[in-house]
Image (cartoon, helix red, strand yellow):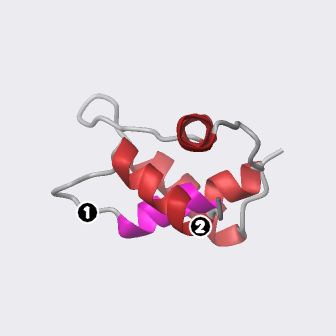
Amino acid sequence: MNAYTKAQLEDRINDSKRYDPETQIMIIWGIDDVREVMKNRRGTLLITDEIAMQVLMEAKRRHDADAGISWATIECIVDELIPA
């Protein structure tokens, strides 16, 4: 089970309430994406859900509307937050 803080849960609920699939698109990054980066950069899938969510929350915090979130964004954050 994913362990989210109260603020993270509130963000997820608010995001889902604002989403209208008739007029919007939503791009979703998940913990499996972080694991894929770990596999490619470190040769391992071993990472806790909590650490993977920290990476994703940091990506959300840094999100830039012009650049978006990319594989390079996730790679950079993994390298910063998770010691080799």
How far from the left and from the top, in percent, is residue 26? 36, 38
User: Most prominent secondary structure in the magenta stretch?
Assistant: helix
Q: Is disc 1 placed on a helix, strand or loop?
A: loop
Tell me if 69 is positioned left or right of 44 in this view.
Answer: left
Comes first in the chain, label 2 or label 1: 1
**Outermost right residue:** 1
Report the residue marked by disc 2.
81
Q: Which residues are magenta?
A: 54-62
Residue 80 sits inside the magenta stretch: no
Q: Residue at x 57, y 54 (%)?
A: 13
Whether label 2 touches label 1, CB < 8 Å: no
Q: Nearer the viewer, residue 4 or 69?
A: 69
Q: Which mark is residue 5?
A: none
Q: Quadrant of the C terminus?
A: bottom right
Report the residue marked by disc 1.
64
Q: Amino acid at mark 2?
A: Leu
